[in-house]
Structure formats: C-alpha cells, structure tokens
Image (cartoon, rainbow, N blue to C red):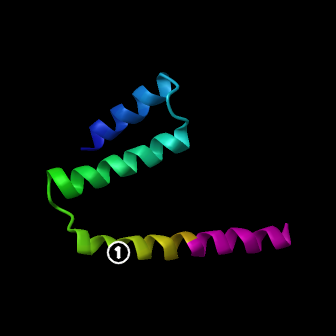
Amino acid sequence: MRNAEDTLELTAGCARIFKPTEASAVAVAYALVVGVVVYRAIRIKDLLPSFSKSVISSSVIMFIIANAGLFA
C-alpha cells in the first residue's frame, strides 16, 4: 500500500496538482479509505481513539514549539 501512496504523491507533485503538504493529506485520506473500505483492517469505532491520540501528540509538539519561541 505504501508504494501506491508514494506514486500518488510523486505523480501529483510532478504534475503540480498538489503541493507537498496537500499531497501528504491526500495520501493520509487515501490510506484511511483503503484501510477501512478495501482491507477492512480499521474499524470505524477504532478511529476516534486514534484521532484523539493524534490530536494530543500534535498539541504537545505545538506547545513545545510555542514555548521554544519564547526563549529564542
């Protein structure tokens, strides 16, 4: 599955359809759809805890970056 995501990102990037950040978001959406619909490896009820862990991790990193800016 990772090769398909790489191909999607490179093709869209070379064709200037997406910028790199947007291509990453599209790759995440693609992986989510493939994991839920095609492989059925991810259940819908497992998504909320996964999203909440992701939000907490992102907020911790942003908090560290914001506080580092105070000392710069």
Q: Is residue 35 above or below residue 61?
A: above
Which range of residues does the magenta coloring cover? 59-72
37 with respect to 22 (left or right): left
Task: Say what secondary structure mark 1 lies in.
Answer: helix
Q: Is residue 70 magenta?
A: yes
Residue beneath the point at 18% across and 54% down: 37
Q: Most extreme residue toward the top, as rendered? A: 15
Percent coordinates x, y for residue 25 in the rendering: 46, 48
**Quarter of the image where one finds residue 7:** top left
The residue closer to the viewer here, 7 or 17, is: 17
Q: Which residue is mark 1?
A: 48
**Quarter of the image where one finds residue 27:** top left
Q: Quadrant of the N terminus?
A: top left
Q: Categorize mark 1 by other alpha carbons within 10 Å: few (<14), some (14-19), many (20+).
A: few
Q: Report the predominant secondary structure element of the magenta stretch.
A: helix
Residue type of the residue flagged with mark 1: Leu
The tally of labels here is: 1
Percent coordinates x, y for residue 5 in the rendering: 33, 40
Q: Quadrant of the C terminus?
A: bottom right
67 with respect to 59 (left or right): right
Percent coordinates x, y for residue 43 in the rendering: 20, 68
Residue beneath the point at 47% across and 40% down: 23
